[in-house]
Amino acid sequence: MIIKYVLKKGYKLQHQLLDWIIIIVTTISIVWGAYKIREWIHNACCSPVSYMIVTGERNYTTDTDIDQLIVKLGVLGTFITQDVNIIQKQIESLPWIQQVSVRKQWPDTLKIHIIEYIPLTYWNDFYIISTKGIIFRVPKEYRDNDQKVMPSLYGPEGSERVVLANYYVFNEILKSSKFHIKSVHMDTRYSWQLILQDNIHLKLGRNNIIERLYYFIKIYPILIQKINDNNTCIDYIDLRYRSGFAVRWGSNSITPVLCGK
């Protein structure tokens, strides 16, 4: 009985020792793992922002533009310390930017989403008017490309909204007859001129401009017949007459036509 008791006691001590070893090893593993995780998080958080992902439909903004703007800010901060609002304001300084959102993506990336103004027309050769009526500038190489595909509007400084509003009206009237506007001019006397496809100039004057535009649509088939018969072209059509119009042909001859409207 005594020998049996001693054996059980020794076995119990060994079992307790093994339990303690397991506890100690487990504790060390947990502490070491926590330390390494903390070290990894610290290194990740303290590492500088290294990558950028730029999204959004861009007509004007290039990656180089964004790089140069961020370079002006100096060295970027760490993932934790970098203020994305500063970067956002810097990019918003580009005149064709409507909206920018900048956010962080773990562990070292900035995600930048850009919304540009949508161009509608050219304005006075140096500016663009957006679909929201906002005037903005773009680099010359982009303006040259836009001029080939967008109509041009001209007017005195500060008259862009008036000219744009009339452009919408003119375009709505003319497109029903499949005419396309290349440019709209309003001078300081509020006198209007249009240039259509094939470089046909319409002189509308100051008064009754909508009535004169409808009148042009009415008489244009007659002019087309003359163009076909004489193999010539129209330089401009002067609609400023009370009861008729005048045509300047490509040969520089002017034909006044008086008739009731």
Image: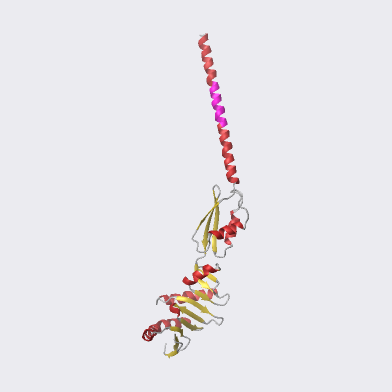
Give the magenta range.
16-28
Q: Residue furthest top?
A: 1
Number of numbered discs visible in the structure rendering: 0
- Residue 90 location (% of width, % of height): 59, 59
Name the one closer to the observer, 240 or 33.
33
Between residue 64 and residue 169, name the one nearer to us: 64
Based on the picture, tell me whether residue 17 belongs to the magenta stretch. yes
| Residue at image point 55% right, 18% down | 13
Q: Where is residue 200, by image quadrant?
A: bottom left
- Horizontal and vertical percent for residue 170? 46, 77
> Is 135 one of the magenta-colored residues?
no
With respect to residue 24, does 151 lie above or below?
A: below
Task: Give the quarter of the figure containing the C terminus.
Answer: bottom left
The answer to whether 255 appears left or right of 142 in the picture is left
Q: Residue at x 51, y 70 (%)?
A: 144
- Whether 204 is drawn above or below 158: the answer is below
Position above or below: 86 against 129: above
Magenta span: chief secondary structure? helix
